[in-house]
Amino acid sequence: MERMASKSQRAPRRTEALSRDVIVTAATEILDAEGEDALTLRALTVRLATGYGAIYHHVADRDDLLAAAADHVIARIVTDLAADPEPQQALRAIALGLFDAIDAHPWVGAQLNPEPWRPALLDIYESISKQLQALGVPQRALSDTAGVLVNYILGVAGQNAANARALASSKMDRSAFLAAAAARWAELDPARYPSVHKAGTHLREHDDREQFLVGIDLILAGIEAVNRAGKDSSAKVSPEAARRVLPGGTPARDRRA
């Protein structure tokens, strides 16, 4: 009877079909609720009422699971927020969507950089590049321009998420932290640190999201200015110079029979 009772006390086995999507969704829920350290294959088998073999059938290991969870979160952002027909607004929406996603899922930022071939990062790069092309960025400058935007977005969003986690670990309220920082800045020598001293007066009302968007707008304004300057420069080519150049940009004197 004791042996039969112990069997009846075991956790019920899963009856629904297990898929990679189901596993990744469960992993994402664990990551959001408890952080990276809580995501173990053991925790996942308990949550899904299944065995290790069933998990390994769909994911290679814990690292693969973390990366897949990040892909899962990011895919929805770049798909849903790039629909605006105006490329500048679409870029702002993508940037803010990624900032908010990484703020809501702080573990995502750490998963995007180690493997630049992961779908999440590739989707971000492609989505931003598409909007930059629509904005008129020439092909020769597309890679660098997209890289600047991607690095800014992921760098600032990731740092913001890291700061938020550090603050949460310290058990310190954000408003109290900003007040303490403002007080320290107010004590600085205004002759040596005039800009920081003045900035301290506004630090209590600091909004990370608003500051992030200011940076995006500055980058977009710079892109627009460079594009405009390039078009103005092209428009100033003299008729004589134009006649000396064959289609494709080859000087006439370099033409070979």
Image: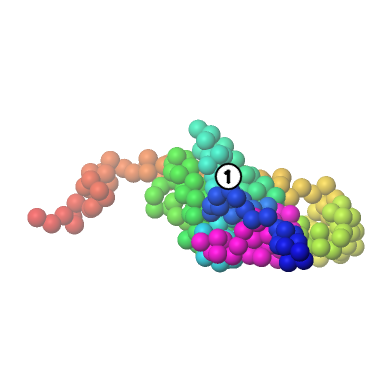
Image quadrant assignment for residue 179: bottom right
Tell me if residue 71 can be seen: no
Relative to 19, 49 lies left or right: right
Image quadrant assignment for residue 162: bottom right
Magenta range: 30-57
The structure residue drawn at horizontal position 66% and vertical position 65%, both measured from the top left corner, is 42
Relative to 103, 179 lies left or right: right
Residue lying furthest left in this view?
257
Which residue is the site of mark 1?
77
What amino acid is found at the position of numbered circle 1 in the picture? Answer: Ile
Relative to 146, 172 lies left or right: right
The structure residue drawn at horizontal position 55% and vertical position 39%, both measured from the top left corner, is 80
What is the x, y in percent for residue 32?
70, 54
The structure residue drawn at horizontal position 23% and vertical position 45%, both measured from the top left corner, is 247
What is the x, y in percent for residue 224?
51, 43
Residue lying furthest top in this view?
85
Crowding at dot 1, Cα within 10 Å, few <14 / some 14-19 / many 20+, comes out as many
The structure residue drawn at horizontal position 81% and vertical position 63%, both measured from the top left corner, is 169
Q: How many marks?
A: 1
Callout 1: SS: helix
Magenta-drawn stretch contains 6: no
